[in-house]
Image (tube, helix red, strand yellow):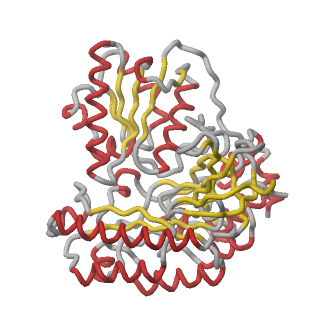
Amino acid sequence: MGKLIDEKIQGTSLLTPKKTDNGRKLYIESYGCQMNFSDSEIVASILSAEGFNTTNKLEEADLVLVNTCSIREKAEQTVRKRLEKFNAIKESRPHVKVGVLGCMAERLKSAFLEEEKIVDMVVGPDAYKDLPNLIQEVDEGRNAVNVILSKEETYADIAPVRLNSNGVTAFVSITRGCDNMCTFCVVPFTRGRERSRDPHSIVKEVNELWNKGFKEITLLGQNVDSYLWYGGGLKKDFDKASDLQKNTSINFAKLLHLVAEAQPRMRIRFSTSNPQDMTLDVIEAMAAHDNICKYIHLPVQSGSNKILKAMNRQHTREEYMALIDNIRNIIPDCGISQDMIAGFPTETEEDHQDTLSLMDYVKYDFGFMFAYSERPGTLAERKLEDDIPLDVKKRRLNEIITLQQRHALYRTQQHLGKIEEVLIEGDSKKSDQEWMGRNTQNTVVVFPKEQYKVGDFVLVKIKDCTSATLIGEAVGYTT
């Protein structure tokens, strides 16, 4: 399979930015999920071809773009506060233009121009190729909006500019959109329906990253397990495909094999998975390749069947636990993390206890936990009363966090005394005398620098731990 994909790739190429410096500088801020940060790299590539040079200094910028998230109210509040900061920049430098990108732009559309007078341009997640035209409109004194959603993978031919890169790890987008329609989530409305990227362009990008010295990639999508390439188009239209298209289609498990075989020395991660779509062949593909990291981010959101149904999650508590069992049986040392929402509408104390008991069953390595916040336009906002008092939400969230910290410490303690492979990513946050990297389970490891350097695969003996970090000393390079 790997040989076949390599032969096909010879006829494909990614768009490499051709700089024609126009003297203008671009500043981008990104908020929210990993996909937003990946999209910002695509934006930088598109504008690099138009002569923009990126800068990490806001005061130097001629064009300021903020790539936004709508998944939680706090994220939107953060963006609005940042726009106040940008307004001060515009007052001192009136020529500066400000654009809002991403999910918040898609959700609010042209209303954003009225609500935030500072904003010159509103661009949805599928419209970044239109940025040169939109910037021209803004330069001519008109506000510009493009939030049209696509039916195809939009950016497969673009080589992203790696912003703030450590030169070691990189994101590679493989799908866009989501069909699952969870009642709390705005993603289907802001990013559209699921569509997948041509696997040849994915492997091409992975190969190019390896040739540039990158050692680890993360395959990205709102729901990577739904990846399905049958020649293009929306996943929901797969049933209309020809027999040839169906017989030669590539699902996520096959894609994992292709990428792992194309670069057997490169580490491969992926995010995010959906329990209802993760199949045994994906877990088996992980087990079959040493370079696929033994870590799965597997959001569950609640341990209560009643709440899962209210969320329109297409799995039950029992099905989720069976999936966990399969993962543990096939990959015994697999790291697993969660997303959890506390205080979803109608949640009772019994429902909350179901969540805590599910956590006790899995004992996650780490997690991302939030109190429910109502998002405009979602089915939950339209159909369900946000009836859990804030103090109850906070108390339940604190109980979830406390339990997760206990489980995280239990998991890190399992590594004590072991020698594990760590990819060095950079300095430790607490000491410039120590390196920071991650093991295959995605757990942070710190150790003295000695003669090693960023990008090295190092064997580290684990001697101590906290609930979030493993502490050790290097014993040699990976052979």
Q: Position of residue 276 (x, y in %)?
A: 47, 75
The C terminus appears in which quarter of the rendering?
A: bottom right
Vertical comparison of 269 with 33: above or below: below
Quick one: 429 or 372, which is closer to the camera? 429
Left-right relation of 376 to 82: left
Tell me which corner region of the image, top left, top right, bottom left or bottom right, holds residue 335.
Answer: bottom right
Residue plotted at (43% across, 81% down)? 360
Quick one: 144 or 422, which is closer to the camera? 422
- Please give the count of numbered marks on the rendered protein: 0
Vertical comparison of 62 with 247: above or below: above
Q: Position of residue 110 (x, y in %)?
A: 26, 36
Residue plotted at (28% across, 40% down)? 109
Quick one: 460 or 21, which is closer to the camera? 460
Q: Is residue 158 visible?
A: no
The N terminus appears in which quarter of the rendering?
A: bottom right
Q: Is residue 276 visible?
A: yes
Quick one: 396 or 427, which is closer to the camera? 427
Q: Position of residue 50 (x, y in %)?
A: 54, 22
Q: Position of residue 410 (x, y in %)?
A: 52, 74
Residue plotted at (59% across, 48% down)? 171
Vertical comparison of 136 with 30: above or below: above
Residue plotted at (65% across, 60% down)? 439
Vertical comparison of 461 with 23: above or below: below
